[in-house]
Amino acid sequence: MFTHTLRVIPLMLGLALAGCAGSGDSTSASYLLPETTAVQQHDARLLVMVAPVSMAAFLEGDGIVMQLNELEVHQARNHLWAEPLSGQLRELLMDRLSDTLPNSQVIFRGQPGLANLPAREIRLQLDRFQGRYDGMALIRGRWQLLNKQGRLLRQQGFEVAAPLQEDGYPALVRALASGWEQVADTLAAELAASITSSK
């Protein structure tokens, strides 16, 4: 009985979000991904060039995406991204990398940078960035790390499932931002390690 209750709680949380995603909700809101302060820093001197974040087509709309079950996804009509999601993700990633790599220069790919620093380029493909019916925020994709000449140094898939602290879209946005910062922190560690391994 207790185990059954534990299984129902995340489902009810997911249904509460799904209800918010439905057409019956007339309250409109727009969201920006929040930032938190990074705890860990890496002592690495790098020029980090961040390419635009590539996303699955169903994530490119204005509405926040909710996965209703194993098969269905729904894009909210009244709970929207205040700015295009790909741009928000890129900005948040760059800000986080700047915090965790304070001795490095983090720029948009194509901008001029310091020529005396070893350069790395980050490319990201995002396949999932959504709420899920079990009360989790799901982020999944893969990243590539390249050197200045465009040679692939490393690539890896990632998946983060962050629990929502309460129901509703504000909690979902906070959980998605937290998960994205986890991805950024992993990339910062990889960038620092890439300099050590190249010596």
Image: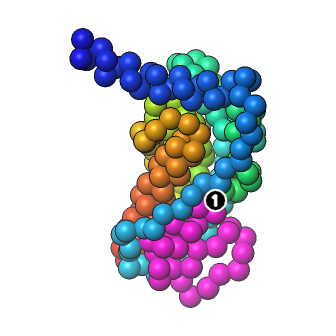
Count the marks: how many?
Answer: 1
Q: From this view, report whether residue 96 is shown above or below residue 136.
A: below
Q: Residue at x 70, y 56 (%)?
A: 87
Judge from the rendering whether residue 114 lies leftward or rightward of residue 198; answer left or right: right
Residue 121 on image: x %, y % = 58, 65
Q: From this view, report whether residue 9 is shown above or below residue 82.
A: above
Residue 50 shows up from this direction: yes
Q: Residue at x 46, y 38 (%)?
A: 166
Q: Amino acid at mark 1?
A: Arg
In the structure shown, which secondary structural element does the residue marked by tag 1 occupy?
helix
Judge from the rendering whether residue 85 lies leftward or rightward of residue 7; answer left or right: right
**Residue placed most toward the observer, 65 or 3:** 3
Q: Residue at x 39, y 64 (%)?
A: 189
Q: From this view, report whether residue 125 is shown above or below residue 168.
A: below
Given the current orientation, which residue lies at the most extreme left position?
2
Quadrant including the N terminus: top left
Given the current orientation, which residue lies at the most extreme front position?
27
Q: Residue at x 72, y 70 (%)?
A: 110
Residue 155 shows up from this direction: no
Residue 194 on image: x %, y % = 42, 68
